[in-house]
Structure formats: structure tokens, C-alpha cells
């Protein structure tokens, strides 16, 4: 009787081991497929996002062209506003450049003053 019980316990241990190994393999195979599927979906979504941005940009261009055709005065005014904003920005950059040049000259003259 004890031999029979030992044989049953041995079979149960072997079955548990086989079940554990099969479960582990299935989980890793399934996880690999899920990860690949997720990567594919992510790549597809990025591509669609890029396509959407391109379409949005083209729509903006088409809208601005249509507005220019329908209302040339408004288009001219908007262009003038953009030009004045760019001019103002250029003036600010030139002023910053002058300030940086003055600071650079001051920094260059400092070591000469210390050496004297």
C-alpha cells in the first residue's frame, strides 16, 4: 500500500512539474506576442499621427490661400502684421547682440586690468 501511495505522489509531483513548465512557456510565448503587438500598434499610431499633422499643415496652407483669394485686404494686413513682428524681433536680437558684444569686451578687458 505504501508503494502505491509513493507512486501516486511521484506521479503528482511529475504532473505538477510538467504543468509548471508548460504554464511558464505559454506565459512567455504569449507575453512576447503581446509585446510585439503593442510595439506594432504604437508604431502604427505614430505613423498616423505624422500623417494627421501633415494633413493639418496642408489644411492650414489651403485655408490661408483661400482666405487670401477671398479677402486680399485681410491677407495683406496679416502679412504686414507678420512682417512688423519679424522686424521687431530682429531689432530685439540686434540689441541683444550689441549688449553681448559689450559684455564680451568688458570680460576681455578684465584680465588685462588684473595683470597691470
Image (cartoon, helix red, strand yellow):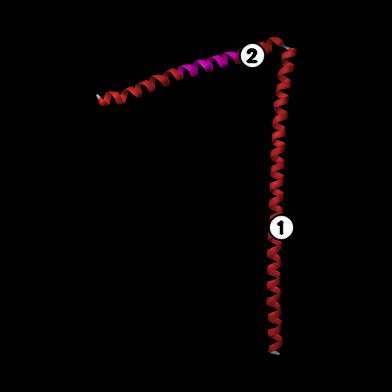
Give the overall secondary structure of the magenta segment. helix
Residue 46 to residue 19: above or below: above
Q: Quadrant of the N terminus?
A: bottom right
**Residue 73, quarter of the rendered image:** top right
Q: Is residue 100 within the magenta segment?
A: no
Residue 89 horizontal side relative to residue 64, left or right: left
Q: CA distance from mark 1 to mark 2?
A: 58 Å
Q: Quadrant of the C terminus?
A: top left
Tell me the residue at 69%/76% (across/down).
14
**Badge 2 element:** helix
Sequence-first tag of 1 and 2? 1
Residue under pointer 1: 30
Q: Are marks 1 and 2 in contact (CB under 8 Å)?
A: no
Label 1 packing within 10 angstroms: few (<14), some (14-19), many (20+): few
**Residue 77, quarter of the rendered image:** top right
How far from the left and from the top, in percent, is residue 95? Answer: 46, 17
Residue 69 to residue 35: above or below: above
- Viewer-proximal residue, 112 or 29? 112
Label 2 packing within 10 angstroms: few (<14), some (14-19), many (20+): few
Number of on-image labels: 2
Residue under pointer 2: 79
Q: Residue furthest top?
A: 73
Residue 48 to residue 63: above or below: below
How far from the left and from the top, in percent, is residue 40? Answer: 71, 46
- Viewer-proximal residue, 70 or 47? 47
**Residue 47, quarter of the rendered image:** top right
Residue range highlighted in magenta: 83-95
Tell me the residue at 68%/80% (across/down).
10
Tell me the residue at 49%/17% (across/down).
92
Q: Which mark is residue 91?
A: none
Amino acid at each position: 500500500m505504501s508503494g502505491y501511495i509513493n507512486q501516486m505522489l511521484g506521479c503528482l509531483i511529475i504532473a505538477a512539474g510538467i504543468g509548471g513548465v508548460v504554464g511558464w512557456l505559454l506565459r512567455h510565448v504569449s507575453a512576447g506576442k503581446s509585446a510585439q503587438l503593442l510595439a506594432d500598434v504604437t508604431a502604427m499610431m505614430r505613423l498616423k499621427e505624422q500623417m494627421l499633422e501633415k494633413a493639418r499643415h496642408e489644411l492650414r496652407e489651403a485655408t490661408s490661400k483661400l482666405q487670401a483669394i477671398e479677402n486680399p485686404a485681410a491677407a495683406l494686413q496679416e502679412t504686414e502684421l507678420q512682417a512688423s513682428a519679424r522686424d521687431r524681433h530682429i531689432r530685439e536680437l540686434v540689441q541683444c547682440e550689441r549688449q553681448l558684444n559689450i559684455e564680451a569686451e568688458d570680460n576681455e578687458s578684465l584680465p588685462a586690468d588684473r595683470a597691470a
